[in-house]
Amino acid sequence: MEAVSDISAFSAVMAGICLSAAAGLRVFIPILALGLAGRFELLPISEQFMWMTSTPVLTIVGLAALMEVGSYYVPLVDNLLDLLATPAAMAGGTVIVSSLLPEMNAAAQWGTAAVLGGGTAGVVQGSTVLARGLSTTSTGGLGNSAVSTGETGGSLLAVVLAIFVPIIFGLIVIALVVWLLAVAIRQFRKPRQQPGSGPDHGEHSPPGP
């Protein structure tokens, strides 16, 4: 029975990581899904977070999710939302994982949740900021609606997979986050060529006699 309990706890944490990745795409969709999943006992939300399953909270979060999805189709507003969504996504991911962690002391609970949930949401959100920035500069914002649709669809898909295949999808999410971090670190460490330092701008030897 203890082994079954350990597997259930591990599955819940992996579901939290998956939902945190979804929060990196849309903040309120996975929070709404978590509340509904807890209400219908699809996910084991801890007792101190059962307020997330109440009807008033679900209604407010549902309206916020609709407003968030719609706002990303408004030119310029979508870029502004990206600035606000990054800390919101990290906070949402932290709360999501914290609500699904097994019982532990508060410091360990929130610290673990910040790393697993907030970190995952932050990395995913950072990648969407870059994608929207590239779309804005390359298409003048005309391609941003396609990016927004992909983000919303991705968040919904991640929510479904988090609830029904949390362990498998959780491992995929972790691998993806590690890959994104590796790419970011590689780009950060890449030496930047200084102006005038290229092969055509180097010093030339004086001509011989």
Image: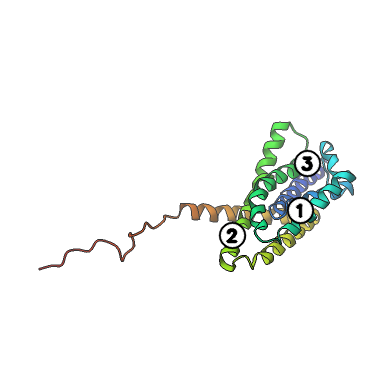
**Which quadrant of the structure image shows residue 176?**
bottom right
Q: Which residue is mark 2?
A: 133
Q: Nearer the viewer, residue 175 or 76?
A: 76
Between marks 3 and 2 in the image, the one whose residue lies nearer the viewer: 2
Mark toward the start of the polypeptide (1 vs 3): 3
Left or right: 60 in relation to 201: right
Q: Position of residue 180 (x, y in %)?
A: 59, 55
Mark toward the start of the polypeptide (3 vs 2): 3
Residue at 36% in and 58% down: 195
Q: Is residue 158 visible?
A: no
Q: CA distance from mark 2 to mark 1?
A: 31 Å
Task: State which quarter of the image contains the N terminus.
Answer: top right
Per the image, label 1 sits on a secondary structure element best described as helix
Could you classify mark 2 by the number of other residues whose Cα lies within 10 Å: few (under 14), some (14-19), or many (20 or more)? some
Residue at 77% in and 57% down: 161
Q: Give the answer, above or below, for where 54 lies relative to 155.
A: above
**Which quadrant of the structure image shows residue 2?**
top right
Mark toward the start of the polypeptide (2 vs 1): 2
Q: CA distance from mark 1 to mark 3?
A: 15 Å
Q: Which residue is mark 1?
A: 166
Amino acid marked by disc 1: Pro
Residue at 79% in and 43% down: 3
Q: Give the answer, above or below, for where 110 lies relative to 82.
A: above
Amino acid marked by disc 3: Ser
Q: Outermost residue toward the left?
A: 209
Left or right: 171 in relation to 188: right
Per the image, label 3 sits on a secondary structure element best described as helix
Q: Which residue is mark 3?
A: 99
Q: CA distance from mark 3 to mark 2?
A: 33 Å
Q: Position of residue 187 (x, y in %)?
A: 49, 55
Residue at 82% in and 36% down: 48
